[in-house]
Image: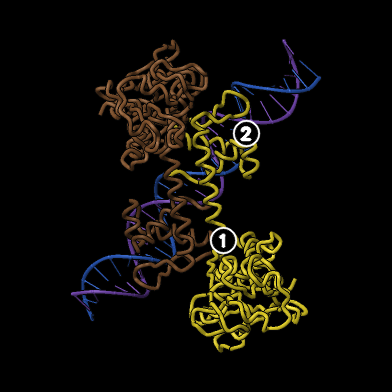
Chain colours: A yellow, B brown, C purple, D blue
Amino acid sequence: MISLEQINMLVLSAELGSFSACARRLGKVQSAVSHGISNLELDLGVELFDRSSRSPKLTPEGERLIRSARSLLAQSYEFEQIAESILRNEESGLTIAVDDALLAPYVSTVLQQFALTFPYVQIELVSLASPDIVNAVATGNIDIGVMFAEIEANKQVDFCYVGGVDFIAVCHEAFPLAGQRVSSESDLAPYRQVTVRGTRKKEPQALISITPNVWWCSSNYAALELVMQKVGWAYLPLPLVSPLIEDNNIHKIDVVFDHKPWSVPVDLVSKKGAQRGPAYEWLFDAFKQAFAG
Amino acid sequence: MISLEQINMLVLSAELGSFSACARRLGKVQSAVSHGISNLELDLGVELFDRSSRSPKLTPEGERLIRSARSLLAQSYEFEQIAESILRNEESGLTIAVDDALLAPYVSTVLQQFALTFPYVQIELVSLASPDIVNAVATGNIDIGVMFAEIEANKQVDFCYVGGVDFIAVCHEAFPLAGQRVSSESDLAPYRQVTVRGTRKKEPQALISITPNVWWCSSNYAALELVMQKVGWAYLPLPLVSPLIEDNNIHKIDVVFDHKPWSVPVDLVSKKGAQRGPAYEWLFDAFKQAFAG
DNA sequence: TTTTAAATATCATAATAATTGATAGCATAA
DNA sequence: TTATGCTATCAATTATTATGATATTTAAAA
């Protein structure tokens, strides 16, 4: 069976164009590399280098094998990296539940950084409506939840307030409310409101429906889609709708009794007493900063 | 540096649930495997097996590493397979030029078999109009061309007749010719014909245009597209249009003076004096059989 | 052309690692 | 309990790999 040492010699010698240079780089003597390469050639039955000149050049056969050799080396490097990741007590994977309205831009940018910092920790991302996340963290295998705050408490989980996301009232550009001045709740009442609530059918207290005619969605994206279809108006997260407002697809309803945007608090949720590794700690802090900044 | 022997022991022992069984399979003694595994554990700093029971079980850390170990083994197997492919004098790759009208079903099914027979020979597939293939084989790096026969000879290439493909006259279902009885060329003359010729602007002798009003395409697919757009009628390969005729998208023009479909001969083209390896020979024979059967 | 520096192949020797066979300690099933 | 089959350990052997010295070749510099 071929050895990884030999493969390493093959790749390095091919890159450097010199057995001696390869030996220096590997901290060995030149004859070791010379031997190693010729043993590999004997094992494979294939001449890998053309030694007719001063600096060894890969033969066509060597060229054909070097790609596979490189990926073999890369694979062995990754194997050792995973072992080191284990030694650092890094989790093998984290499962995160996120309200899809918070995915972009907050969570997604954090995850991008996470992938660079913990390349050997796998992420499983579960999209849930905020009211369902608490339950999922309490009962399921979810490590961190990122959600809009709930009033009700849950003794099995820890909540950590990290910041607020602005919600604004929006409708489609062609919706009747678009051109209208709204000075009181009664002005909104004649129009259908689209609201988000979880699949457990319990209406979240934070997002009180102020009109009698209401449709329910389990995600903010779905609510946005209904708004786009002129089904009704909705309170939606500013980051979700701001690009659409700029493109004049969605109209911001100026509710005059709202002096500033309605900020909904965002919580990080985690199971009480769960084991926390370095990847968890990093991710938790990164979420905190993302919503604070 | 870890050795592939140790990785092999890891994977095999995990599969068999026994160091002894692994040793028997590898033709070694039990203590060799025992040593190999514990050396690997020492190198990585990670305990891979739980030896508390009679049969060793992977620890969670071992489970996390075994996937990477398996793919490392697979990679090393592929490396050795490529070396053996070289020993069998198999080409590293073949470049084939095909008239796209012949790709399905003839060439594609042959290539499917080829991929199974020669998994380590890469294929580069070049789509060209038949009249351009001869030139490409003569001047370029193309090993085999599959094309409709040309009258003109070329001294740099060998032609090999392998069979014929039926061409029929077709138009769109809604094209004026669709409902019409065609008894002579003059019945076709009023309508625009779409014809295929190469990019060198030399009209192929085999596909003579019989109407004065002609549009040109460099591929049969493009010609079919124009027919679908009711631009005109065309002579097209039966395998290309038969599914569309069955779906009633395309209408077969029954030209009464054609007693049987017009069969256009298909040639395999190869460069004279080129080196031919086993993959080339296999592919050439497979093409012969595909068009003959 | 000659010289010089650096590269490779070869070989005997030394160092290292792997293999073996024997033994002892456990776990499991009869 | 006994018997079987497994693993860990150890010392001895064997095989493999690394080393250092040397001869030869190559390519650039003098």
- From the top left corner, tell me how far across and down residue B175 is, in percent: 40, 34
Point 41% across, 60% down: residue: B34
Q: Judging from the image, what secondary structure is the residue with disc 2 in?
A: loop
Q: Chain of mark 2?
A: A
Examine the rendering and report whether any part of residue A45 can be seen.
Answer: no
Examine the rendering and report whether any part of residue B44 can be seen.
Answer: yes
Q: Residues within 10 Å of mark 1 (few under 14, many from 20)?
A: many
For disc 1, the marked residue is A120
- From the top left corner, tell me how far across and down residue B272 is, in percent: 42, 15
Q: Residues within 10 Å of mark 2 (few under 14, many from 20)?
A: some
Q: Give the quadrant of the C terminus of chain B.
A: top left
Circle 2/circle 1 CB separation < 8 Å: no
Q: Judging from the image, what secondary structure is the residue with disc 1 in?
A: loop
Whether A29 is drawn above or below A215: the answer is: above
- From the top left corner, tell me how far across and down residue A79 is, in percent: 52, 56
The front one of A108 and B98 is B98
Upstream in sequence: badge 2 or badge 1: 2
For disc 2, the marked residue is A18
Q: Please give the label number shown on residue A103.
A: none
Judged left or right of residue B184, residue A265 is right
Q: Amino acid at mark 2?
A: Ser
Q: Amino acid at mark 1?
A: Tyr
Q: Chain of mark 1?
A: A
Q: Look at discs 2 and 1 and give the one toward the viewer.
A: 1
Point 65% across, 37% down: residue: A21
The front one of A136 and B170 is B170
Point 57% across, 77% down: residue: A196
When asked about the image quadrant of residue A103, the answer is: bottom right
Point 51% across, 46% down: residue: A72
The front one of A185 and A176 is A176
The Cα atoms of the two marked residues, 2 and 1, are separated by: 34 Å
